[in-house]
Image (tube, rainbow, N blue to C red):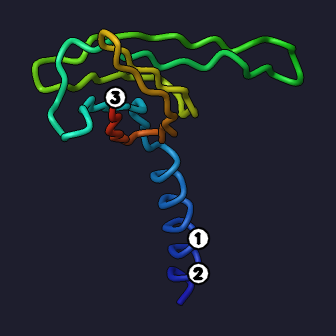
Amino acid sequence: MKAMRYLLPLLFAALIGWSSCEKTSPAEALITVTDSTGKRIPGAVVVLRQDSVVNPTTGAQAVINESKLSDAAGQALFTFKLEAVLNVEVDKGTLSARDYIRLEQSKQVTKTIIIR
């Protein structure tokens, strides 16, 4: 009985310590660009940006502006260290679209953007 009294708190402490050591991986955004018929569009310029967030404590402005071309499958993959809500801008010739995406830590979030 005495052993159980000491074993249970030790087990609980070990469980808390083990779960707090979990490593997080980056937040990913997979953008798929299609036209109105659903055909995937390669070579589109995909821009993810966040330029209006200001830290209320330090006054520092977060400026994120990443761009890539969609690949042969009409996709562009972005990786960020932290979660964020980003504006998505896609352009290909005279076609364009605007939307947003919410990134989640350690997850790949997918978004299909239809350019018109």
Give the SS element for disc 1.
Answer: helix
Q: On the picture, is 27 further left or further right than 7?
A: left
The C terminus sits in image quarter? top left
Pointer 3 residue = 115
Q: Nearer the viewer, residue 19 or 107?
A: 107
- From what the image shows, is residue 44 above or below residue 79? above
Q: Amino acid at mark 1?
A: Pro
Q: Tell me where residue 91 appears, x and y as whole percent.
A: 37, 15
The reply to whether residue 59 is visible in this rendering is yes
Question: Residue 116 vs residue 54: left or right?
Answer: left
Query: Which label was assigned to residue 9?
Result: 1
Image point 31% across, 32% down: which residue? 30
Question: For the residue carrying disc 1, how many other residues have a C-alpha within 10 Å: few (<14), some (14-19), or many (20+)?
Answer: few
Using a 10 Å C-alpha cutoff, classify the residue at mark 3 as few (fewer than 14 neighbours), some (14 to 19) or many (20 or more). many
Q: Is residue 98 above or below residue 5?
A: above
Q: Position of residue 1 (x, y in %)?
A: 53, 90
Q: CA distance from mark 3 to mark 2?
A: 64 Å
- Assess whether mark 2 and mark 1 are in contact (beta carbons under 8 angstroms): yes
Q: Which amino acid does the dot numbered 3 rest on?
A: Ile
The numbered dot on residue 5 is 2
